[in-house]
Image (tube, rainbow, N blue to C red):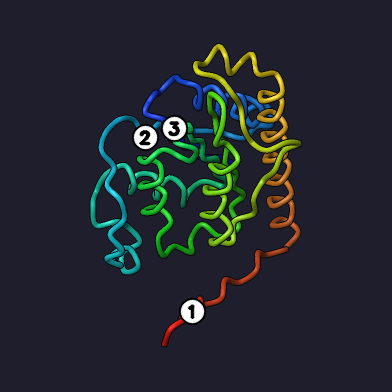
Amino acid sequence: MKVLMINGSPHKNGTTFRALKEISNVLNENAIETEIITIGDKEITGCIACGACSKTGKCFKNDIVNEIIDKLIEADGLVVGSPVYYASMNGSLKSLLDRVFFGKSCFAYKPACAIAVARRAGTTATVDDINKYFTINNMPVVASQYWNMAFGSNGEQVENDEEGMQTMRILGKNMAWMLKCIEAGKKAGIAPPEVEKHTKTNFIR
């Protein structure tokens, strides 16, 4: 089993990475492979709702977004981590997630969770925003003992957030448990629900 972890920060070894690493360590201890991808500081343009991905499964713009789509299709679970700049997820991550998830159904029933790291405020709003990508795609959301957040302005400060680090470790344990339950269900012949074709009702017709 494998979990894809997206570091939404431009900083490869910053605060968000440190929180993700705490989860990764627990998953690895449970024989679950992890891969942390840092989106970096290169430009990621937003979704233009052209609909091309509904025909090909890929975004028309060939960049890190398509790389992540390929990796997520192969992965069994997903963790998305974001720094908080202005009380929500950072802009590059927002653009990436809009394009990764636009019009997709191939991620259904993969457990997923969001984490946020901030100096002070905006973490719950960030986690809420990211979770919406999962809940619109039939992805079970993994929880912890507290909201999935940690605090600090650098990696060392995040490590000193004992409650935040414990929240990440428990999140990792819960993700591992859910993945193992799903795997056991498959072996017992319990298939996931069949995804129905989406029925859309417009408010104005």
Residue on which disc 2 sits: 39
Residue type beneath disc 3: Tyr
Residue type beneath disc 1: Lys
Residue 184 sits above or below residue 36 on the image: below
Looking at the image, residue 158 sits to the left or right of residue 7; the answer is right
Viewer-proximal residue among 54 and 188: 54
Viewer-proximal residue among 5 and 88: 88
User: Image point 27% across, 65% down: which residue?
Assistant: 50
Residue type beneath disc 2: Ile
Residue 54 sits above or below residue 130 on the image: below
Quadrant into which the C terminus falls: bottom left
Q: Residues within 10 Å of mark 1 (few under 14, many from 20)?
A: few
Query: Residue 159 — which label?
Result: none
Q: Earlier in the sequence, mark 2 or mark 1?
A: 2
| CA distance for labels 2 and 3 | 16 Å
Secondary structure beneath label 2: loop
User: Image point 40% across, 41% down: which residue?
Assistant: 93
Residue 109 sits above or below residue 65 on the image: below
Secondary structure beneath label 1: loop
Secondary structure beneath label 3: loop
| CA distance for labels 2 and 1 | 33 Å
Residue on which disc 1 sits: 200
Between marks 2 and 3 in the image, the one whose residue lies nearer the viewer: 3
Looking at the image, residue 80 sits to the left or right of residue 188; the answer is left
Quadrant into which the N terminus falls: top right
Residue on which disc 3 sits: 85
